[in-house]
Image (cartoon, rainbow, N blue to C red):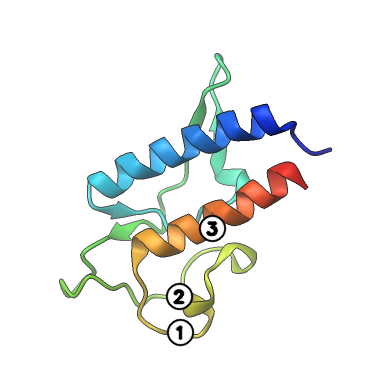
C-alpha cells in the first residue's frame, strides 16, 4: 500500500539530497525508478545503478544530453520526444513520479 505522508516525505527528502549530491558532482542519473532506490541496514535511502549516468554538461559541453536512456515509464516527455534535455530536470521529473508512487 501507500506510504504515510511522513514516511514518504522522509524518503523523498533523502532521495532529493542524494540527487542534489550527484548533480553537485556534475552527474545526471538518468534512470531513477523505485528499483534503483535501496535501503541500508539503518533504513537510509541509497541511489543505485549509475549505468546510464551522464555528465550534466552534456557530452559536447552544451549543457544538454541527447541519448534516449532510462526506463520508459519514468522518462520525462522531452526524452520520449527525442529532444535534447537538461539532466537535472529529467532526474527531478523521474523523482516526482516516484513520489506519486510512494503516496498513491
Q: Determine whether the residue tagged by mark 3 lies in a helix, strand or loop.
A: helix
Name the image quarter holding residue 20.
Answer: top left
Q: Which residue is mark 3?
A: 94
> Residue furthest toward the right?
1
Question: Could you give the CA–CA distance between mark 3 and mark 1, rounded to whole angstroms?
Answer: 16 Å
Left or right position of 85 against 42: left
The front one of 28 and 89 is 89
Residue at point 48%, 38% (across, down): 15
- Using the image, tell me which numbered label, if any, was put on residue 68: 2
Residue at point 50%, 85% (across, down): 81
Residue at point 22%, 70% (across, down): 63
Query: Mark 1 touching mark 2, by CB under 8 A?
Result: yes
Quick check: 52 above or below 14? below
Name the image quarter holding residue 4.
Answer: top right
Task: Characterize the local packing of mark 3: few (<14), some (14-19) or many (20 or more) Cα atoms within 10 angstroms.
Answer: many
Q: Determine whether the residue tagged by mark 2 lies in a helix, strand or loop.
A: loop
> Residue furthest toward the left?
61
Left or right position of 97 against 86: right
Q: Which residue is mark 1?
A: 82
Q: Where the N terminus falls, by quadrant?
A: top right
Query: Mark 3 touching mark 1, by CB under 8 A?
Result: no
Residue at point 55%, 38% (across, down): 12
The front one of 28 and 15 is 15
The front one of 94 and 69 is 94
Q: Position of residue 86 (x, y in %)?
A: 34, 69
Question: Could you give the CA–CA distance between mark 1 and mark 2, rounded to whole angstroms?
Answer: 7 Å
Residue 47 in view in this figure: no
For marks 1 and 2, the one nearer the N-term is: 2
Q: Determine whether the residue tagged by mark 1 lies in a helix, strand or loop.
A: loop
Amino acid at each position: 500500500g501507500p506510504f504515510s505522508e511522513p514516511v514518504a516525505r522522509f524518503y523523498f527528502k533523502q532521495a532529493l539530497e542524494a540527487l542534489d549530491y550527484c548533480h553537485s558532482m556534475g552527474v545526471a542519473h538518468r534512470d531513477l525508478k523505485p528499483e534503483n532506490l535501496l535501503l541500508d541496514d539503518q533504513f537510509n535511502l541509497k541511489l543505485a545503478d549509475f549505468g546510464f549516468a551522464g555528465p550534466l554538461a552534456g557530452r559536447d559541453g552544451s549543457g544538454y544530453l541527447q541519448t534516449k536512456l532510462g526506463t520508459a515509464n519514468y522518462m520525462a516527455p522531452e526524452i520520449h520526444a527525442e529532444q535534447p534535455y537538461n539532466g537535472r530536470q529529467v532526474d527531478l521529473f523521474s523523482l516526482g513520479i516516484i513520489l506519486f508512487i510512494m503516496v498513491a
